[in-house]
Image: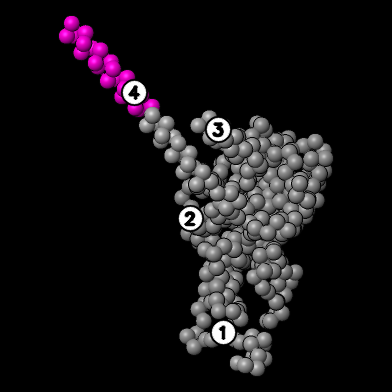
Amino acid sequence: MFKSAIIGLLSMMAVLLLPQMAKAEYADVVINNYSDAAGMRPAVFPHWYHRIRFRCKVCHADLGFEFKAGGNKITMAKIIDGQFCGACHNGEISWSVENCGMCHSGIPGTPTSIHGSTVQRLVAPTYKALDGKSKPK
Amino acid sequence: MNIGKKLLISVAVGSVLLFAGTIATAAEQKTAKKVEKKGNVSSANTFNRLLKKEKMRNAGPADDGVHDAANDSTHVLQPPLIAYDGLPPSDFGNYINWVKALDGGQLKPRYDLSDPDVEPLIMDLNIVREVKASVADVVFPHKPHTQWLHCSNCHPKIFIPQRNANVMSMSAILLGQKCGVCHGKVSFPITTKSCKVCHSKPKPKDWKPPKSEASLQTPWR
């Protein structure tokens, strides 16, 4: 009895402590090109929120965002300069850059990746590295 | 005296019953232990070992495993389910049929950064791509794509705008090339439930799968 109870408790603990599969919304992009190294949380970009307000064309044709997670080498200097996110997040169309934590809200150490992608859902682990630029730990 | 006797008897009976009960429970425990041992298979033999299932659809920012709950602003971010209220559902991706939402007028995303009145440049042209395998042929509709995107997003970098110039395979798409640049990342993903969205033109009734070179060359056929 005690043994089974202890085993049960331990397995519960293991389930709770093991790194769980991220349940992030489909197409949420974690951008961690430079954040971790700069001591900031990685930025999280919710595609769903932005596609309700804008068509893909606005960012991916007009603003020049590449179709690749982490492929744009976005820095805060560029954003303040009005490039990439800074085209809207300037206090005119959307809130301005002083709201650091609104974008930089990811769990520290999360690699650059797009969540829920088909490549991520493949069971063969060799393909996982193709999805994000950083190597899986 | 009679009452005392009755009491004694009842106590005795009670204790006997209790004892019997404990014996019975002990026996049950023993059999249970035996059953447990019988059914004790290796933990390697779990059911659906490689099936990763989402435990929670459209989780809020604080519980989605990507946002840091220790960050105050995380709790200010909008949970997706609130925003999806009233949008047509689907079986995959965000579980929202974005194209239908746009057609039905539930969504009015801007085509221009600041001017909400700019109309998109829509092209209504279906491209049929014949598939070698037995699955239905692919019909590519330009209309929903041009509603969201600009020509320059796909042409000429991803798709050469010329007949028979684009060689495609499902494995390439699954690994993020061609259609897979968006489908499987942002737009609807490749799952068993979504095959027929693209593979939508059934093969003619007299269609037979082409024989592979290897089987044609086998002398005993």
Q: Position of residue B194 (x, y in %)?
A: 54, 64
- Labels 4 & 2 near each other (Cβ < 8 A): no
Tag on residue A130? none
Q: Earlier in the sequence, mark 4 or mark 2?
A: 4
Provide the chain ID for the residue under circle 4: B
Element type where label 4 sits in the image = helix
Tag on residue B18? 4
Please name the residue that numbered disc 3 is placed on.
Answer: A3
Provide the chain ID for the residue under circle 2: B
Element type where label 3 sits in the image = helix
Q: Is residue B11 magenta?
A: yes
Residue count near mark 3 (Cα–Cα under 10 Å), binned few <14, some 14–19, many ≥20: few
Please name the residue that numbered disc 2 is placed on.
Answer: B89
Provide the chain ID for the residue under circle 1: B
- Report the Cα–Cα distance between label 3 and label 2: 47 Å
Please name the residue that numbered disc 1 is placed on.
Answer: B209
Q: Earlier in the sequence, mark 1 or mark 2?
A: 2
Q: Residue furthest left?
A: B2
Q: Residue at x 55, y 68 (%)?
A: B195
Marks 3 & 1 on one chain: no
Q: Position of residue B1 (x, y in %)?
A: 18, 5
Which numbered disc, 3 or 2, marks the residue closer to the eye? 3
Q: Label 4 is placed on what type of residue?
A: Leu
Magenta-colored span? B1-22
- Labels 3 & 2 near each other (Cβ < 8 A): no
The type of colouring in the image is one colour
By secondary structure, the bulk of the magenta-drawn segment is best described as: helix
Marks 1 & 2 on one chain: yes
